[in-house]
Structures are given as C-alpha cells and as structure tokens.
Image: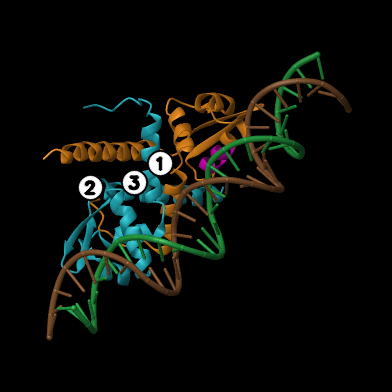
Chain colours: A cyan, B orange, C green, D brown
DNA sequence: CAACTATATACGCATATACTCATATAGTCT
DNA sequence: AGACTATATGAGTATATGCGTATATAGTTG
C-alpha cells in the first residue's frame, strides 16, 4: 500500500475529524490520557493523579469514552478506564515532536 | 533512537499540545488545510475553495499561521498560504485511519 | 433493608470562540 | 495623489464548553 493521494474528505468526515481533535484539546483530558499510558486505572486513582475534582474527572472520562478514545470496565463499585484507541500514543507523539521542532526552529530564528 | 518512554509532559507542554489540537478542531480550518495539500494558494482562492466569507477565512488563516501550521508569503497585493508544518499530513492521516477503524469496528459490533 | 462507597449527572455561571458586518490597511495602477 | 483591489481587523452577538456545588445512581456490606 503506497502513500494515499489526498482524496478530499466529505463534510461529515471533516466534522468527525474536528470533533476528535476537539476532544484532545483539553489539558485535563490529556492529563487523563497520560495517566493511562501505563495501564488501566479507576476513577479514584485518576482523580488523585490529575488533581481534579471527582465530578470533573468523571465528566472528562465520559467525553473521552464517548469518543472511543478510552474504554471502560466496571468491577464492582469501581470503574476502570484504559486507552482504547491504539492511535492515541502515536498521535501524541506526532504532536509532541512537531512542537519540539517548532520550538527549536523558533529558538534558532531568534539569533542571526 | 528507540521508542521513547512515556515521560510525563509538564503542565506547560500539556497546554501547548492542547492548544495545537484546538487549532485543528474546526471544520473550516481543516477545509483550509485540505485545500492546501496540493500546494500554496492565495486567500481569494481559499475563499472560493471553502465557500466561507473573506473575513472568516482570513481569521482562520491567521489562527493557523500563528500556530505555525501554515506559512505566509506575500506577493504584491496577494498573500499565499501553504502548509508549513510537515507533521500535518501525517497527523490527519493518523486521525482519519483511527476514525475509519472505529466506524468499521462499530459496524461489526452491531451484528452479533 | 439501611448505611456506606464509588461513580455519574443536573444545574448554573463564567469564559472562550466562531461568525457576520463594517471598516481599516497595504499594495497596485493610471 | 486618487481610485481600485486583496487582505486584515474591530465590534458585537450567539453558542459552546469547562468548572464547582449539590445530588442522583449503582453496587457493596452489615
């Protein structure tokens, strides 16, 4: 499979992509994702790890789960979340690399 | 250089990443990016290609440029924009693939 | 069943941002 | 300089969304 040509996305597809980016556009949600890189955790642990309120963490977890970025597993009273989309680490890596490159280039641009 | 361990991002880095995702979270901006996959275009062409108003397109172009996603080149009265961040096509590809996978899996989940 | 715990949700407020309309700026041509 | 064109920006409005507080739901244990 070679490199795909840029077939233009439909309007519906564009909105899906935009919605996905929007879900990833909140620092608290990124903190949650980050906290789940090492494996699944329950809500209480995530509240502790992120320093957010229980209500807020719960809401963000719902948002992430609705976007199929996280997956849920209930075990008695507790609910365990984990990263359910394998592209997420890759995505974060691409963005982080791009940001680092920009900061480096920007630093270089300042001198000369 | 092997696969990076998940070193936790600093709070500042998280906000940068979130901001970058936020810039990509608008359908009109995605349309603009898409319209620039084939090469640079001036504002008038982008207005025509996206169907937006001149003012709105101009503002979104500014947002994308401020985020270092697009680059500007002035030529007389016209301003030409192009994709200035090589990670953008990659990013879009990762997201599109993930969405397609989800839709496929979802379709399969509905039966049985 | 009653008390308790873990998680989810309803409501209200504050803020951010996308859009439109009107106008300003920058560059060109006569 | 003055008219004209391409792009950018300011102001105002409508909508969306994140957060805190309080409460509801689901599950457990005595």
Query: Which mark's residue is nearer the viewer, 2 or 3?
Result: 2
Task: State the residue at coordinates (56%, 34%).
Answer: B57
Question: Does B54 lie within the magenta span?
Answer: no
Residue A86: give its label. 2
Which residue appears farthest toward the left when viewing the image?
Answer: B112
Do residues under tags 3 and 1 come within 8 Å of each other at their CB atoms? no
Q: Is residue A21 above or below residue A53?
A: above
Query: Which mark's residue is nearer the viewer, 3 or 1?
Result: 1
- The rendered magenta stretch, by its main secondary structure, is classed as helix
Helix, strand or loop status at disc 3: helix
Query: Which mark's residue is nearer the viewer, 1 or 2?
Result: 1
Depth check: give the residue in front, A101 or C6: C6
Q: Earlier in the sequence, mark 1 or mark 2?
A: 1
> What distance separates the C-alpha of mark 3 from that of mark 1?
17 Å
* Residue B27 visible here: yes
* Residue B87 visible here: no
What span is colored magenta in the figure? B59-65
The image position of residue A33, as x and y in percent, is: 30, 57
Protein chain holding label 1: A
Which residue is labeled 1 in the image? A18
Q: Is residue B81 above or below residue A93?
A: above
Residue A94: give its label. 3
Protein chain holding label 2: A
Depth check: give the residue in front, B8 or D10: D10
Task: State the residue at coordinates (40%, 37%).
Answer: A15
């Amino acid at each position: 499979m070679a490199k795909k040509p840029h077939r233009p996305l439909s309007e519906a597809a564009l909105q899906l992509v935009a919605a996905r980016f929007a879900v990833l556009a909140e620092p608290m949600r990124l903190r949650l994702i980050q906290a789940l890189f090492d494996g699944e955790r329950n809500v209480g642990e995530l509240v502790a790890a992120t320093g957010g309120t229980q209500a807020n963490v719960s809401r963000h977890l719902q948002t992430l789960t609705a976007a199929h970025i996280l997956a849920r597993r209930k075990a008695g009273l507790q609910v365990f979340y984990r990263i359910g989309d394998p592209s997420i680490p890759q995505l974060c890596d691409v963005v982080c690399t791009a940001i680092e490159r920009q900061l480096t280039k920007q630093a270089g641009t300042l001198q000369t």
